[in-house]
Amino acid sequence: MPVALFWNLNRRTLCEEVAQLCNAHEVDILVLAESHMPDVEIQRSLRRETETVYIAPFNELSSRIKFFFRYPPESVRQVADSYGVSIREIRPPVGMSLLLAGVHLSSKLYVDREEQSSQARLVTRMIEEAERSVGHERTLVIGDFNMNPFEGGLVDADSFHSVMAQSIAERKMRKVRQVERRYFYNPMWGKLGDGSQGPPGTYYYQGFKNRELFWNMFDQVLIRPELLPYYRKEALQVLTEVGDRQLLTGDRINGYFSEHLPIMIGLATE
């Protein structure tokens, strides 16, 4: 079961914490956003903590995303890179191949909702082109979307077209204005609010506008229908501790570590 972990580090120096998470959860694929730490320092920490070598393939255009893989170099192939998105084909020594897209889309601090939706559409087209290139749609998207699951960039048919119900995603696609639009399944809907296991979201912000959500689910995983047979609900987690240290302080995120909580997913692909 390959395990993928994503964490927006918010420019914090967290080599040891990242390595501890990877060791505790036997992470195969590590994806980081806003990491200003040299790759070699992260790799050293991973080697000390896990006694495993992680490769760190270079992202040509998207420095916003960093990958670390617990696979041989020949198992990972670059498919596409652009601003805020990096796509890799993974062919592990055991199990089927996957297409992995790591994303870190633009923040609401700098662009409006319309611009966010436009960027989401561009990323979706990139993913579709990558799927055609590799010849399959076993695609996993993970990262910081800077949008909640219910916002247009995530749910619009001409964008990610991600749905909250697995039964809908299993239909694979629907026609909208005579154009076939493929689904993603977004399991992060089930992590929203107090009714979910774990925290109400992955990012907390208390502003002064008339409408404030406080908790947001910016960090998400999207799954193509072709991977749903290998998805297990219990294998998706929003992590709240590193060793014996808590990433939450009361009902908020402990900003000493990051403003975001890490997320993790495992797929039973063997």
Image (cartoon, helix red, strand yellow):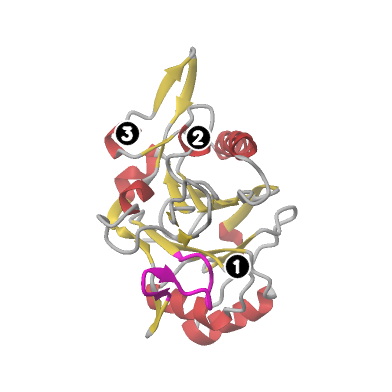
Of the 4 image quadrants, the one containing the C terminus is bottom left
Give the quadrant of residue 168. top left
Mark 3, secondary structure of its residue: loop
Of the 4 image quadrants, the one containing the N terminus is bottom left
Mark 1, secondary structure of its residue: loop
Q: Position of residue 30 (x, y in %)?
A: 52, 65
176 shown above or below 81? above
- Check disc 2 and give the amino acid type: Gly
As measured in the structure, the alpha-carbon distance from the residue carrying label 3 to the one carrying label 2 is 21 Å
Residue denoted by label 1: 10
Mark 3 or mark 2, whichever is nearer to me: 2
**What is the span of residues highlighted in magenta in the rendered image?**
247-262
Q: Position of residue 246 (x, y in %)?
A: 39, 79
For the point 61% across and 83% down, the residue is: 44
Residue 123 as seen in the image, left or right of residue 265: right
Q: Position of residue 26 (x, y in %)?
A: 41, 73
Residue denoted by label 3: 170
Mark 2, secondary structure of its residue: helix
Q: Earlier in the sequence, mark 3 or mark 2?
A: 2
For the point 70% across and 57% down, the residue is: 59
- Check disc 1 and give the amino acid type: Asn
Q: Earlier in the sequence, mark 1 or mark 2?
A: 1
Please indicate, yes or no, whether residue 72 appears anywhere in the rendered image: yes
- Check disc 3 and give the amino acid type: Glu
As measured in the structure, the alpha-carbon distance from the residue carrying label 1 to the one carrying label 3 is 35 Å
16 shown above or below 200? below
Residue 171 as seen in the image, left or right of residue 263: left
